[in-house]
């Protein structure tokens, strides 16, 4: 679980690992909204709070800016929510686009955040060893059931220190020649066989780039929409890990999926940020 702050002036939302990490986010963001409240003249820098009567003047520019940010943060503390989850934003029922490399490590914290709060995890990934490593290192306990679907054979020598004993983990190998419909059917069958009523489902799709590259735009769009519809029956969140800048066709497909995607999140260091 994380802490969340949502700006009341725009659609910006940030989630941090704990409340202490929110102060830099709120201060910097509110300063951007109220940059005209900060001025410099006569060798001095001044700020005038837009929320109260507080005003300060100093010679130290950096110190004055830092003090103003801290002051603005004080006005934002009542909008900080603790013990929340990113998926709460969509009621644990929807599609989340994650703007991060599907195979890079920068999104591992977000992967663990989603999967650690679910009872059933289904992950379609080209890098199963990385996923296992991320979950094993970042979670205090694994989900009740984890099914990892990959087009490659799992290399157990890559994770020799991961103790699978006592974990309910299954590795499913897919034929790389399968069509999107066949991949979707496989995921649907996994949901049928493993989902328990009332249980949260976290479905990760990190092969979106491969789907787009292997098939036309129409079929890639249909694949995501069918997965979203199938997951809606079970109740859960579908996460699409994408790097739209890496492939023009990926960006095109995402444009067609604009109404299907409920939330777009970027990873910014140790925080998650909602993108408009």
Image (cartoon, rainbow, N blue to C red):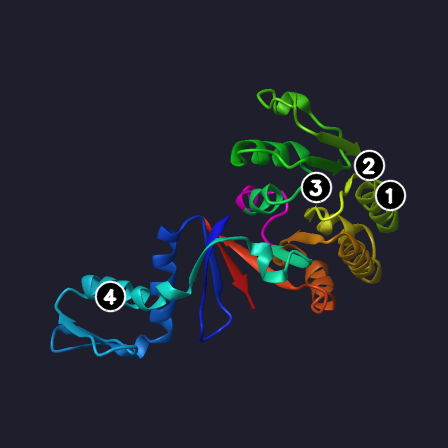
Tell how many labels: 4
Q: Earlier in the sequence, mark 4 or mark 2?
A: 4
Q: Is residue 84 left or right of residue 93?
A: left
Q: Residue at x 22, y 64 (%)?
A: 67
What residue is disc 2 on?
A: 174
Reply above or below: 48 against 21: below
Q: Residue at x 63, y 36 (%)?
A: 131
Q: Secondary structure at mark 2?
A: loop
> Which is nearer the eye, 231 or 63?
231
Q: Earlier in the sequence, mark 1 or mark 4?
A: 4
Q: Which residues are magenta?
A: 99-109
Q: Position of residue 270 (x, y in %)?
A: 45, 48
Q: Residues within 10 Å of mark 1 (few under 14, many from 20)?
A: few
What residue is disc 3 on?
A: 120
The Cα atoms of the two marked residues, 1 and 4, are separated by: 56 Å
Tell me whether circle 1 and circle 2 mark residues in contact (CB < 8 Å). Answer: yes
Look at the image and tell me whether residue 169 can be seen. Answer: yes
What residue is disc 4 on?
A: 65
Look at the image and tell me whether residue 106 can be seen. Answer: no
Q: Is residue 247 left or right of residue 139?
A: right
Q: Secondary structure at mark 4?
A: helix
What residue is disc 1 on?
A: 178
The Cα atoms of the two marked residues, 2 and 3, are separated by: 20 Å
């Amino acid at each position: 679980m994380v802490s969340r702050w949502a700006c009341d002036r725009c659609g910006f939302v940030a989630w941090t690992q704990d409340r202490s990490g929110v102060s830099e986010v709120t201060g910097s963001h509110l300063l951007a909204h109220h940059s005209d409240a900060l001025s410099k003249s006569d060798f001095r820098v001044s700020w005038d709070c837009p929320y109260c009567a507080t005003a300060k003047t100093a010679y130290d520019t950096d110190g004055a800016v830092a003090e103003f940010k801290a002051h603005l943060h004080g006005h934002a503390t009542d909008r900080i929510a603790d013990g929340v989850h990113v998926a709460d934003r969509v009621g644990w029922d929807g599609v989340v686009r994650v703007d991060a490399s599907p195979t890079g490590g920068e999104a591992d914290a977000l992967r663990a955040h989603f999967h650690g709060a679910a009872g059933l995890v289904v992950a379609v990934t080209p890098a199963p060893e990385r996923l296992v490593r991320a979950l094993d290192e970042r979670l205090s306990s694994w989900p009740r059931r984890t099914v990892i679907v990959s087009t490659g054979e799992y290399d157990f020598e890559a994770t020799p220190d991961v103790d699978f004993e006592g974990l309910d983990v299954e590795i499913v190998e897919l034929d790389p020649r399968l069509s999107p419909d066949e991949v979707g059917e496989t995921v649907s069958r996994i949901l049928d066989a493993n989902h328990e009523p009332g249980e949260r489902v976290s479905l990760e799709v990190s092969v979106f780039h491969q789907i787009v590259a292997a098939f036309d735009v129409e079929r890639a769009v249909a694949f995501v929409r069918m997965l979203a519809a199938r997951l809606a029956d079970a109740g859960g969140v579908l996460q699409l890990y994408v790097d739209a800048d890496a492939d023009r066709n990926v960006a095109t497909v995402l444009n067609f999926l604009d109404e299907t995607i409920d939330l777009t999140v970027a990873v910014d260091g140790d925080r998650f940020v909602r993108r408009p």
